[in-house]
Image: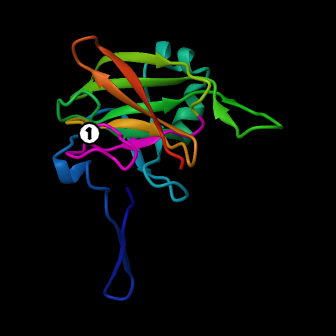
């Protein structure tokens, strides 16, 4: 997924929202605003407010969220409202990429938090949006009516996380993405 920048009238710059968000009628009435992260397609920066329980799970402060943290935005439960995968405290590593110690999926309906789910997975380095799709991916990534998130394997194993409405939790599938 990528955002497109248009220059109109020689000076006005318009950054289009990625398909799968407002193009699909996604509504954001939460206390979180978001913008595309310029360095990684399918990733965002989120700022705003959530309840203290969620901040505690993420091991971040209210000020950190107000300044902006990495996140993924999509409609994970299919209700038409923006849901957020917020990245928690970042673990530094001299040998590996820095990664979030924990992420929390926060589900909204209008301005109200419906539920949230903590996800701890040592393989998550920088997950990005896995937009709803009607066809399987090149390496067998699944068809999905709802957005999810993905950790692209880049020659290894790609892991796709999709929300299971019946079980009320994210489930992951792994796909060999190398030759």
Q: Is residue 78 left or right of residue 64?
A: left
The dominant secondary structure in magenta is loop
Instruction: Classify the position of the N terminus by image quarter.
Output: bottom left
* Nearer to us in this view, 111 or 99: 99
Q: Which residues are magenta?
A: 125-142
- Which residue appears farthest toward the bottom when viewing the image? 10
Query: Above or below — where is 82 with respect to 13?
Result: above
Label 1 sits on residue: 28
Q: Is residue 141 left or right of residue 165?
A: right
Q: Eyeballing the image, is 49 above or below 57?
A: below
Residue 102 figure quarter:
top right
| Number of callouts | 1
**Closer to us: 169 or 50:** 169
Residue 178: % across, % down: 54, 47
- Based on the picture, tell me whether residue 26 belongs to the magenta stretch: no
Q: Nearer the viewer, residue 145 or 46?
A: 145
Q: Position of residue 136 (x, y in %)?
A: 28, 44
- Residue at point 23%, 46% (across, down): 135
Q: Is residue 176 left or right of residue 79?
A: right
**Vertical position of residue 5 compared to residue 64: above or below:** below
Residue at horizontal 31 percent and vertical 44 percent from the top: 131
Judge whether residue 135 is colored magenta. Answer: yes
Circle 1: element type: loop
Q: Residue at x 83, y 37 (%)?
A: 94
Q: Nearer the viewer, residue 109 or 158?
A: 158
Residue 128: give x, y in percent of width and height: 46, 43
- Give the residue drawn at x 20%, y 54%: 23
Residue 151: where, in percent of width, then height? Answer: 50, 38
Q: Residue furthest right?
A: 94
């Amino acid at each position: 997924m990528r955002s497109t920048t248009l220059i109109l009238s020689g000076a006005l710059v318009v950054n289009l929202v990625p398909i799968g968000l407002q193009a699909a009628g996604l509504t954001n009435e939460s206390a979180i605003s978001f913008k595309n992260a310029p360095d990684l397609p399918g990733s965002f920066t989120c700022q705003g407010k959530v309840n203290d329980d969620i901040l505690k799970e993420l091991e971040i402060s209210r000020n950190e969220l107000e300044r902006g943290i990495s996140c993924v935005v999509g409609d994970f439960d299919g209700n038409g409202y923006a849901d957020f995968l917020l990245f928690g405290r970042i673990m530094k590593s001299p040998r590996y990429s820095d990664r979030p110690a924990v992420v929390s999926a926060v589900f909204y309906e209008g301005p109200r938090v419906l539920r949230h789910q903590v996800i701890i997975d040592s393989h998550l380095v920088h997950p990005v949006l896995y937009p709803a799709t009607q066809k399987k991916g090149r390496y067998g990534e699944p068809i999905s009516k709802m957005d999810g998130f993905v950790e692209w394997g880049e020659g290894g194993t790609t892991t796709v996380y999709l929300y299971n409405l019946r079980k009320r939790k994210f489930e992951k599938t792994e796909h060999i993405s190398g030759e």
